[in-house]
Amino acid sequence: MRPMPPPAPAPILHRFANPGRFLRATKPLMPWLWGLSLAVLLPAAGWALLLSPADWQQGETVRIMYVHVPMAWLAMSGYAGLALASVLALVWKHPLADLAARELSPVGAVATALCLATGSLWGRPMWGTWWAWDARMTSVLVLFFLWVGHAAITRAFEDEERGARMGAILALVGVVNLPIVKFSVDWWNTLHQPASVARMAGPSMHVSMLGPLLACAIGFTLLFTTLVLARVRAAVMERRVAALELARARAADRPAPGDAVVTA
Amino acid sequence: MSGATAVRGGKPGGLGLAAARRRRRLWVLLLCGLGLGMAAALALTAFQDNLVFFRSPSDIAAGMGHDGRAFRLGGLVEAGSVVRDGAEARFRVTDGANTISVAYRGVLPDLFREGQGVVTLGKMLPDGSFAASEVLARHDETYMPPEVKDALERSGHWNPSQGAAPPAAGWNTMQPAPAGARTGG
């Protein structure tokens, strides 16, 4: 037999392709995920806002970083997740991937908006301006528009499947922006500073600030994941309810066999 | 071509056909991605000059910015060059190789100091100095508590007015001293 490499998804992808199984498998996880998110995020916030030191030149303003940086990371890693879901949806027609992409984009848009807003609040006292059109800020603004555009386009069509396909294509085209966001501060000179944590020479941040930053990043990532998972679950259930209502409405519309005789 | 082979070689019942379609979609996606990536790379390279936020003193020395148009000049504030006279400030901006005098009237940002990166918006004057209408401070990528900065300064490892901090490996494990032991602010 001719060897044929089938690009079939891993069994685990198939296992959760069944929405009913997905609901059953994630139901017991949800309280744990909510609990874990809060159990990490609350101490991390205390560490970052109260216990960690001020910066020698930024003073207390440095604490904005503990929200800004995790939101920036989530805006980008979330977008990578959106791209992955889009590939799964376009190539493998995974039934949950479209739903995951659709439910991911509003959360990603909020994370990106928070990243932009906190950056602006920090920029005013530190740089002396709320906003500058440098390569980093402009590319993050483009990322925000991609998130919002995806959220809008997936909901813009009467035919949901068509909207999902348009959204997936938009999401994949937008992937080109991810390396631009990440490397804009290295490729061109910008007002925004270069990376402090994920850089070749090791973090240029004192450990007393790096610790709470990583704790906040883990906490916000858990919260982000939990929110998206809860949204996907709700969306699956919404579709089930809609399907049931449709079936009931059809059953009610169809005249019973005896009725026709009586009214005639 | 390979799709047709897969169809004929596939099992009956549409499994081979589905796999072939899947593979074709994957290839189309990869090719589109490749094309898009190359187009983006070419566009970004072509617009390289317009994507930088500011010019360096060396760009000016090489003849840029003398056409009377406003542009952004960026670099480090040279140590010992800041002179404040009421609302007016004069300082020199350097990139290590070349230096330009800047005059500015207005409020300087909190982070402005000698050795700090700045981006100024303005025009070149005929005398070769720069008249700025806006001064923004750049923050570098180092984050450290005041105690660590004091310790580095005391031990002679870093003078902040001379520019960027030494490599982090030396100081990012340094523990902040207890609050009582701090000198100055």
Image (cartoon, grey):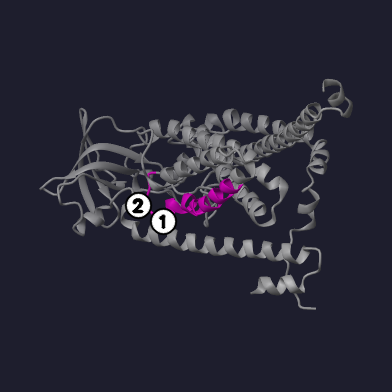
Residue at image location 25% in from the left, 57% down from the top: B58
Q: Which mark is residue A256?
A: none
In this image, A139 relative to A228: left or right?
left
In this image, B126 relative to A237: left or right?
left
Considering depth in this image, is A164 or A192 the residue closer to the camera? A164
Helix or strand or loop: what does disc 1 sit on?
helix
Dot 2, crowdedness within 10 Å: few (<14), some or many (≥20)? some
Amino acid at pointer 1: Trp
Residue B89: image quadrant is top left
Query: Which residue appears farthest toward the left when viewing the image?
Result: B126
Q: Which mark is residue B51?
A: 2
| Residue A188 image offset from top left, x and y in percent | 38, 54
Residue A227: image quadrant is top right
Say if mark 1 contacts mark 2, CB within 8 Å. yes
Badge 1: chain ID:
A
| Residue B136 image offset from top left, x and y in percent | 32, 38
Which is the main secondary structure of the residues drawn in magenta? Answer: helix
Instruction: Establish if A84 lies above or below A39.
Output: below
Q: Which mark is residue A187?
A: 1
Considering depth in this image, is A243 or A54 the residue closer to the camera? A243
Query: Which residue appears farthest toward the right when viewing the image?
Result: A258
In the rendered image, the quadrant that contains the N terminus of chain A is bottom right
| Residue B144 image offset from top left, x and y in percent | 50, 41
Residue at image location 27% in from the left, 58% down from the top: B97
Badge 2: chain ID:
B
Residue A100 covered by magenta stretch: no
Question: For the magenta stretch, what is the residue range?
Answer: A165-191
Mark 1 or 2: the one toward you: 2
Residue at image location 55% in from the left, 52% down from the top: A172
